[in-house]
Image: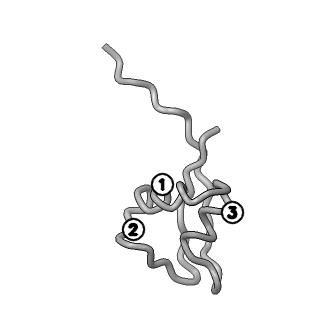
Amino acid sequence: KKKQEEKPVRVVQHTVGPEENLYRISMKYYKNRSGEEKIRAYNHLKGNSVYSGQVLNIPLEN
């Protein structure tokens, strides 16, 4: 029996800017705060800390 199919994901690379945080990045790509957890999990982040110049992979459903 096949495992449940996951939704296809397109990954976008995002370089964190000087004034950005997870909330702002989440709003940019997802238009809501639910993306914060997706970004955290996908990038194995602990907590909400991101730094300027850091490259994050942003998983987007197609």
Tell me which residue sits at (53%, 33%) in the image: 7
First in sequence: mark 3 vs mark 1: 3
- For the residue pair 58 and 29, the one nearer the viewer reads as 29
Q: Residue furthest top?
A: 1
Identify the residue position indicated by label 1 in the image: 38
Residue 54, numbered circle: none
Q: Nearer the viewer, residue 32 or 49?
A: 32
Q: x and y percent of residue 47 in the render?
A: 38, 72
Q: Earlier in the sequence, mark 1 or mark 2?
A: 1
Q: Which amino acid type is marked by label 3?
A: Lys
Which amino acid is tagged 2? Leu
Separation of residues labelled 2 and 3 (CA atoms): 19 Å
Quarter occupied by the C terminus: top right
The spot of residue 61 in percent (x, y) is 60, 41
- Residue visible at 39% across and 68% down? 45
32 relative position to 41: left or right: right
Lower sequence index among marks 2 and 3? 3
- Contact between labelled residues 2 and 1, with CB atoms less than 8 Å apart: no
Q: Secondary structure at mark 2?
A: loop
Distance from label 1 to label 2 (Cα)? Answer: 10 Å
Which label belongs to residue 45?
Answer: 2
Please tell me in which quadrant of the rendered image residue 53 appears: bottom right
Quick one: 37 or 61, which is closer to the camera? 37
Q: Nearer the viewer, residue 61 or 34?
A: 34
Q: Residue at x 48, y 54 (%)?
A: 38
Label 1 neighbour load within 10 Å: few <14, some 14-19, many 20+: some
Residue 6, image x and y in percent?
A: 46, 32
Q: Secondary structure at mark 3?
A: helix
Return the residue at label 3.
28
